[in-house]
Image (cartoon, rainbow, N blue to C red):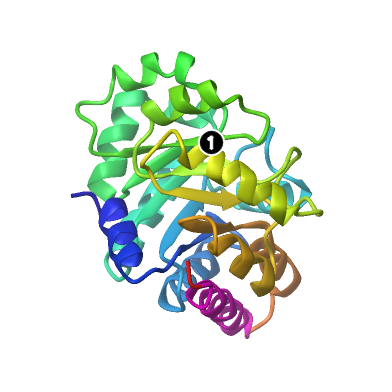
């Protein structure tokens, strides 16, 4: 059983949703990034999404774009992100998902990426701009299916298309809560509930909802209808605002605990 499946199974038995936390590898710098990621996992993040910085993102909003620019300026790249997974795995038991665009993976080498990510201790990968129809090239180079391939589903996706995407996914499905980019405002909770139910009607995989979730109240509301709540830009705002301060990790811990308490109290 994969670490991701085991995590969702255990949470489901307790009637809880997962807190999925995203942060960009190498932001604000390598050492502090590792401290932030550990603080997130120690304070309640159930699944860690480690963002691989990319120069030309299409789904990321301005907050995560700036985080990527800071990380790239400090020399962060896919090989170093995989090295961070290896370093984190020595003390972090939570599943780790590498969150990337296709260009870095292709440039790294498809087979090499698969082997190195697994060896480092990664549990899954989400390639933002790689639809199922274009995934054959990558999957043909993967010697097995030990890495869960997380798929994105948009609120504009037709139901049959949802089924097609779900059939080619593993681990969990990431449902985008709104049209737009990460960090967008205007979360419509009624619409989120409806789209989550529609996606769950065509799959048994856990559904995690992200984009636009930043407060404990929003996390609690989403946790009532989904198996997971994804928070990313809000973490990056904290890093951006306090990256040079000594109490950055404590701020991250406090914020993570507030989200985890909200998700645990949702009573799904």
Indicate the secondary structure of the residue bearing disc 1: strand
Where residue 43 sits: x, y (%)?
46, 78
Where residue 192 sits: x, y (%)?
65, 49
First to last magenta residue range: 247-266
* Residue 251 lies in the magenta-colored region: yes
- Name the outermost residue toward the right: 186
Depth check, front residue: 264 or 89:
264
Depth check, front residue: 120 or 1:
1
Depth check, front residue: 140 or 221:
221
Quarter where residue 157 is shown? top right
Q: Residue at x 32, y 21 (%)?
A: 139
Residue on which the image places disc 1: 152
127 in relation to 188, above or below: above
90 in relation to 116, above or below: below
Depth check, front residue: 13 or 46:
13
* Residue 162 lies in the magenta-colored region: no
Where residue 161 sits: x, y (%)?
53, 22
Q: Residue at x 55, y 75 (%)?
A: 256
């Amino acid at each position: 059983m994969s670490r991701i499946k085991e995590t969702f199974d255990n949470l489901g038995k307790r009637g809880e949703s997962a807190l999925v936390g995203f942060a960009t590898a190498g932001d604000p710098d390598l050492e502090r990034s590792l401290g932030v990621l550990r603080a997130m996992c120690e304070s309640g993040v159930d699944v860690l999404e480690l963002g691989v910085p990319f120069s030309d993102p299409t789904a990321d909003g301005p907050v995560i774009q700036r985080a990527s620019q800071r990380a790239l300026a400090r020399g962060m790249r896919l090989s170093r992100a995989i090295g961070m997974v290896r370093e984190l795995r020595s003390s972090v038991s939570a599943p780790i998902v590498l969150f990337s665009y296709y260009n870095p993976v292709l440039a790294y080498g498809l087979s090499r990426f698969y082997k190195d990510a697994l060896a480092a201790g990664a549990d899954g990968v989400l390639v933002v701009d790689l639809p199922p129809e274009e995934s054959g090239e990558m999957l043909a180079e993967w010697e097995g299916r030990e890495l869960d391939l997380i798929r994105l589903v948009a609120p504009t996706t037709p139901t049959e298309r949802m089924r097609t995407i779900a059939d080619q996914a593993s681990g969990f499905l990431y449902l985008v809560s709104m049209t737009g980019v990460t960090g967008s405002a205007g979360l419509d909770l009624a619409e989120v509930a409806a789209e989550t139910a529609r996606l769950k009607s065509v799959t048994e995989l856990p559904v995690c909802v992200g984009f636009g979730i930043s407060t404990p109240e929003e996390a609690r509301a989403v946790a009532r209808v989904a198996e997971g709540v994804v928070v990313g830009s809000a973490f990056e705002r904290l890093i951006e605002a306090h990256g040079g301060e000594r109490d950055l990790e404590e701020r991250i811990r406090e914020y993570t605990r507030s989200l985890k308490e909200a998700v645990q109290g949702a009573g799904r």
